[in-house]
Image (cartoon, coloured by chain):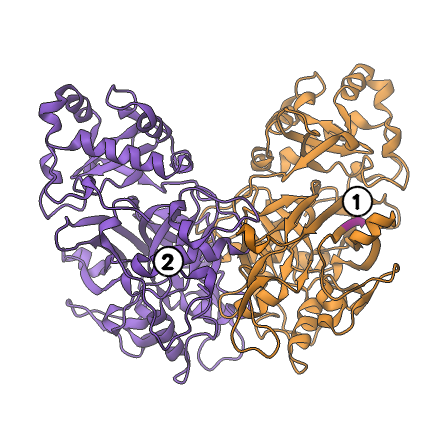
Chain colours: A orange, B purple
Amino acid sequence: MRTIDHTHDAAATSWLASANGAATDFPIQNLPFAVFRRAGALEPLRGGVAIGDEVMDLAALSRTQCLDGLALQAAQSCAAPALNDFFALGPVAWRTLRRALFELLHKDAVATRPSQVDAVRGCLMPQSEVEYAVPARIGDYTDFYTSIHHARTISCLLDPKGDVPRNFQWVPTAYHGRVSSIGVAGQRFRRPHGQALRDGSTTPEYGPSQRLDYELELGIYVGTGNALGEPIALSRAEDHVFGISLLNDWSARDIQAWEMAPLGPFHAKNFATTVSPWIVTMDALAPYRTPWTRPAADPQPLPYLESESHRAQGAIDIRLEVSIETHRMREAGLPAETMSRTSFSHHYWSIAQMLTHHAAGGCNLQPGDLLGSGTISGPELSEAGALMELALAGSKPVQLGNGERRSFLEDGDAIIFQGWCEREGFNRIGFGFNHGRVLPAVSPSAE
Amino acid sequence: MRTIDHTHDAAATSWLASANGAATDFPIQNLPFAVFRRAGALEPLRGGVAIGDEVMDLAALSRTQCLDGLALQAAQSCAAPALNDFFALGPVAWRTLRRALFELLHKDAVATRPSQVDAVRGCLMPQSEVEYAVPARIGDYTDFYTSIHHARTISCLLDPKGDVPRNFQWVPTAYHGRVSSIGVAGQRFRRPHGQALRDGSTTPEYGPSQRLDYELELGIYVGTGNALGEPIALSRAEDHVFGISLLNDWSARDIQAWEMAPLGPFHAKNFATTVSPWIVTMDALAPYRTPWTRPAADPQPLPYLESESHRAQGAIDIRLEVSIETHRMREAGLPAETMSRTSFSHHYWSIAQMLTHHAAGGCNLQPGDLLGSGTISGPELSEAGALMELALAGSKPVQLGNGERRSFLEDGDAIIFQGWCEREGFNRIGFGFNHGRVLPAVSPSAE
């Protein structure tokens, strides 16, 4: 577990004005990592850190005299089109670089190390002028299913007498997902084709999905791995986690309903998954930890998924918001409209439990592996992380302010996720945006 | 589809004696690809081709004067620790290199191009002196479930009134598998831990699997991919396939039974998957094509999975054999014992249908992606591709010649797959061996 230190001090401000104040996702207390380049430029992708409205170019910074020792080595490892090598250096290196950046960006640095501040200024680029890439070479992507509120609502929609699957309260359920179709925020993808059983039919049809949905998730990046056959103890699990981003697990509900039994979702999910560019480090999230609790009436975790320190602070209060921007809203110049808000603190299984369970069978995790948290829904229906829940499987369409209604996503719809943490006595830190847009299906003649 | 040409001529022999005669898997008509290096040596992995008892080093060959044009470019692309760049060159390049190697290794070359034969001799290394690696950087691994005989037996074992899943005859069913734990033949792995519901219990226990099994599959390597959102027509599907190897999808049946609903297998499969080193090209397999048939009483494929040319030769008659070598057999110097034999020609869905279905939703395939065919079982129980079928879920243990019995795999058991093709008028070609061994579970104190 990460500890709270001076880098979380709410009184600390930066010499960079846009990093100060409540409006920014990226104050000096955050310092999330991404991979970027100047938009449209023929230049290499490399690692960067967000500060206010700017990106600090770590490749450029590693060529200045601002860093030394492990912090320099860490910054040099970010001078690559993916952060895997940086991840592999481990938590001491991650923390050392983050602390060094905090010192360089702190307002006191203007007086104590003016030449370094000048050098850092030369490494900044406005976020408005850059484009991002998926921040790691993702070796494997695993998607979990670990919100009991989501599982309960979906189960009841499928069968009014339904409850969560019988193993849900014992197993941090997961399936392997598709890596090749993971894209970074801004991803646009075609509505998928697939087989589905239409109402009243006994034989499936093949065609564009009619029940396209989003799923609000966190994307958790594995920092350091484990050897094949070597489990990861719960107490050490978070040492293996670099940080967290926002993830949209786009889902085709009609395809999913037909294909899923017995081997799980395939076409229903593998056409696109969108991750946000910025990875907020576990170090930055230290102040927002909360106790991990389980209702006393529920089965308690098996010993390998249970510990006292995990109970004390195994959860994280990450606030989340989903918005929609339809084609008509965009045409009319209307802003995106909020669909739901929730918090990751409601989650039934924690990140540490997911990671420990993942490795418990001997499966080897590797730097840059991505874990999806599973859809994050809160206890109230208004806190649901998927449209299928909000619109009760189409029986109660969501009413939008411009008169449109949504049971499922329509062509041209953009879905935007935002995330942030706030706590009395600490600064607000944010995750930036994760947005993606649905394009029309491939026309039959194009096939 | 690949056509039969002079490289399949049964009368063709090589100047290399070990490549001739019925005993070798690797006559001049085969020429499968692998990645290798001298065993234990500090030298780079690179691509090689099997001929008789030797490996031809393609990196070394590309530095001789034996090749030119596209064949040279193709060989140069194999001078790498993975064959992805070679795959990406496409089917014309694959075929051009295979034909050039055929000419160089043909017995007539001794007279027509003696200096080149001398150069080729300098690029050979005995297979007994090399070690292999997984032949591609596998971006994504997808495992199918497409033998109706396997599905029917498993369904009946779980429920005597059971039939195959309702979508089985419509969907070439698949799930995403774990890439990180894929190893090459010779892989040894620890018996996995996991949650399982023991007989008579209502709550799961966590511990080593008690029902470890193998699954006989083919491993199909994607050669060239498709763009996200762009489907692959059935008629073009095999142009995207480089070739085929043997694959063991090790499975923990007790973990699988508890975890699988609703999202599919996870711990039950992700601890290890073993692939054979040699990839037999689709070109080499051209003579062994057979019609793809579907019983008239069964649902016929939807149009996107159906075509006349596919009916004519969509299947391949690949013969397969599973053997076991237990610890006691090894200690006593006894040879491995055959468990079952079958053929891939019994499969319900073809490779082309698997590939087309995979991309139909827009999912992008990439060079080096691996598809598992799913367990290959024939119509007779003796042709089953998993021990769970052969031993009827433990109710009828398999009797071995040395007095041992097996319901599931025990520590120290090695499983060996072999594959080959034979047809009147053509040479026999083989796949080599795929073998892997079960090690004891991690002891509790080590966790």
Magenta stretch, main secondary structure, is: strand
State how far apart marks 2 and 1 are (Cα). 44 Å
Residue in front for this viewpoint, B166 or A238: B166
Task: Give the vertical position of B438 relative to A396 (above or below).
Answer: above
Rendered residue at 71%/67% (across/down): A388
Labels 2 and 1 positioned on one and the same chain: no
Quarter of the figure with residue B327:
bottom left
Judge whether residue A420 is colored magenta.
yes
Residue in front for this viewpoint, B357 or B149: B357
Q: In the structure shown, which secondary structural element does the residue marked by tag 2 occupy?
A: loop
Quarter of the figure with residue B396:
bottom left
Q: Amino acid at mark 2?
A: Ser
Rendered residue at 37%/50% (across/down): B220
Give, as a single range, the part of the protein colored magenta: A417-421
Rendered residue at 20%/53% (across/down): B421
Judge whether residue B17 is colored magenta.
no
Q: Residue A261, position in %: x, y?
A: 51, 70
Label 1, residues with CA under 10 Å away: few <14, some 14-19, many ≥20: many
Q: Residue B201, position in %: x, y?
A: 49, 80
Quarter of the figure with residue A402:
bottom right
Q: Which residue is mark 2?
A: B373
Q: Residue A146, position in %: x, y?
A: 64, 63
Q: Amino acid at mark 1?
A: Gly
Q: Residue furthest bottom?
A: B161
Label 2, residues with CA under 10 Å away: few <14, some 14-19, many ≥20: many
Q: Residue B208, position in %: x, y?
A: 42, 64
Compared across the picture, whether B266 is left or right of B60 comes to right
Rendered residue at 77%/21% (across/down): A120
Q: In the structure shown, which secondary structural element does the residue marked by tag 1 occupy?
A: strand
Q: Which residue is mark 1?
A: A430
